[in-house]
């Protein structure tokens, strides 16, 4: 299992969390997504997958939800 932590800007509420979670869970190989909301600041999402996820595909999923990834430990 691979675990990646993402920093995401622009999230303000539970709907934001749901949108980001849905997009990340749709990626091939993702097992779990956990989002720690920091309304108005930088929120973190922890993604566990059975393969290595690229920063590009993670960023695209976050962008699809309407937010911006500002860093990752991947």
Image (cartoon, helix red, strand yellow):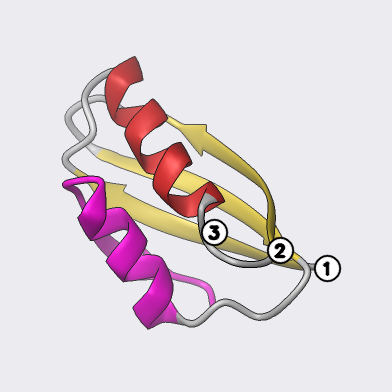
Left or right: 31 with respect to 12?
A: right
How far apart in space, not on screen, are marks 1 and 3 (Cα)? Answer: 13 Å
Element carrying mark 1: loop
- If you read the primary sequence from the N terminus, does the residue marked by circle 1 or circle 2 appear first? 1
At horizontal 49% and vertical 46% (from top left) the residue drawn is: 45
Q: Which mark is residue 35?
A: none
- If you read the primary sequence from the N terminus, does the residue marked by circle 3 or circle 2 appear first? 3
According to the image, label 3 marks what residue?
5
Which quadrant is home to the C terminus? Answer: bottom right
Element carrying mark 2: strand
Look at the picture and state if 66 lies above or below 37.
Answer: below
At horizontal 16% and vertical 46% (from top left) the residue drawn is: 66
Look at the picture and state if 29 lies above or below 23.
Answer: below
* Residue 13 point in image, percent of width and height: 27, 18
Q: Residues within 10 Å of mark 2 (few under 14, many from 20)?
A: some
Q: Residues within 10 Å of mark 3 (few under 14, many from 20)?
A: some
Look at the picture and state if 19 lies above or below 48.
Answer: above
* Residue 34 point in image, percent of width and height: 59, 38
Tell whether label 2 touches label 1 (CB within 8 Å).
yes
How far apart in space, not on screen, are marks 3 and 2 (Cα)? Answer: 12 Å
Which residues are drawn in magenta?
A: 55-74
Q: Quadrant of residue 72?
A: bottom left
Look at the picture and state if 55 lies above or below 27.
Answer: below
Q: Nearer the viewer, mark 3 or mark 2?
A: 2
Q: Nearer the viewer, residue 57 or 8?
A: 57
According to the image, label 2 marks what residue?
49
According to the image, label 1 marks what residue?
1
Left or right: 51 with respect to 56?
A: right
| Residue 25 colored in magenta in the image | no
Q: Nearer the viewer, residue 28 or 7?
A: 28
At horizontal 35% and vertical 81% (from top left) the residue drawn is: 56
């Amino acid at each position: 299992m691979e675990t990646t932590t993402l920093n995401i800007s622009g999230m303000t509420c539970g709907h934001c969390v749901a949108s980001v979670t849905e997009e990340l869970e749709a990626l091939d190989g993702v097992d779990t997504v956990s989002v720690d909301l920091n309304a108005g600041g930088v929120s973190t999402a922890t993604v566990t997958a059975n393969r290595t996820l690229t920063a590009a595909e993670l960023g695209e999923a976050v962008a699809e939800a309407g937010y911006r990834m500002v860093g990752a430990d991947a």
